[in-house]
Amino acid sequence: MKAFILVFGLMIPSVCTVNADLRQNLESSYNIWRTSLIKKDARTWQQITAPHRQMEVRNRIVSEKQPFPAAVFDLPAPPPPLTGLKFLVAKQNGATAKSAYFGKVDFGVGGTPTDNLLVLTYVKGARGWFYDRADFVNLTALQEVRKELSSGDLSYLNGVPEAQPSGIVPPTPIAANPATTIAKVYVFCPGREVQVQINKISRHRFANAKDADIVIGGARLGSNEVQYAIKPLEGGTGQEAMTIRVYLFSQVEGSKPIKAFEYQIEEKEPFKPFGSGSFALDEATAAKLSGR
């Protein structure tokens, strides 16, 4: 379950809570967006989804060599309905807005939903409010917060910067070319933050993590550039072992991924805060990975 990711160094402009019209407009946007996914209505989805989010979704899909926009609707379950949830607040800051809900957020994956927090994000355009994204906060380990929100106390919500509209509309990424070969970047970085950029289009951030992410644009024929930045995190020793890898994935069932790039340091080994490298993809390898 996704919780808030704290981003430090952001200046949060003043935020105003607006009247009931804002809530109605935001909920209308979300419900249209949700219905478009259920009905697999690509035209409406494109009309109601924030432009930067559309491009991010499109780039990820073509990087996985899936059809766009058809793959948008390949979901295990529909987005949760707002009916039955307790509305907490709607806030606007310039051309950005957020609305928050508390209750049994039902993702339709079975089990009995418990009371948790759902925060929806929007940006404003010429035609009104566009839906951007949802943040689900599991409150299982935050029982006091659960009690506060149940009673209408918004102290927790008001204290989290990511629950406030920033006033900044994210720029729309450039369109990535469909991937020649599917690639993923894998990072193991206990006690560190690692930022990786591949071919100047695919940007990734990992913090105290063991995780992988799809490379936007995939691996391209010829040389592929990898740049990375590393810094210790508070609570870490700065001497932990760490690994950055890029894997190429086959579309042939049962085939193992190919390790195309690796930067690795052992425990207590010195490291440079910035570095770069590259890996190559030739026609023969690309054809083999594609099953040709």
Image: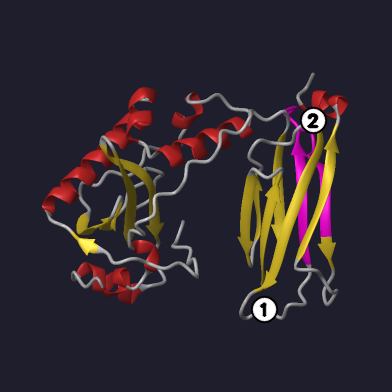
Is residue 59 rendered to the left or right of residue 4?
A: right
Residue 130 vs residue 101, the one in the foreground = 130
The first of marks 1 and 2 along the sequence is 2
The boundaries of the magenta stretch are 242-263
Query: Is there any visible trace of residue 113 in the rendered image?
Result: no
Q: How crowded is mark 2: few (under 14 residues within 10 Å), some or many (20 or more)?
A: some
Image coordinates for residue 219, horizontal then vertical, percent: 74, 36
**Vertical placement of residue 40 versus 227, above or below:** above
Residue 127 vs residue 19, the one in the foreground = 127
- Per the image, the residue denoted by label 2 is 221
- Per the image, the residue denoted by label 1 is 236
SS category of the residue bearing label 2 = loop
- Residue 211, by quadrant, is bottom right
- Residue 126, by quadrant, is top left
Tally of marks: 2
Is residue 218 rendered to the left or right of residue 291?
A: left
Image coordinates for residue 45, horizontal then vertical, percent: 36, 30
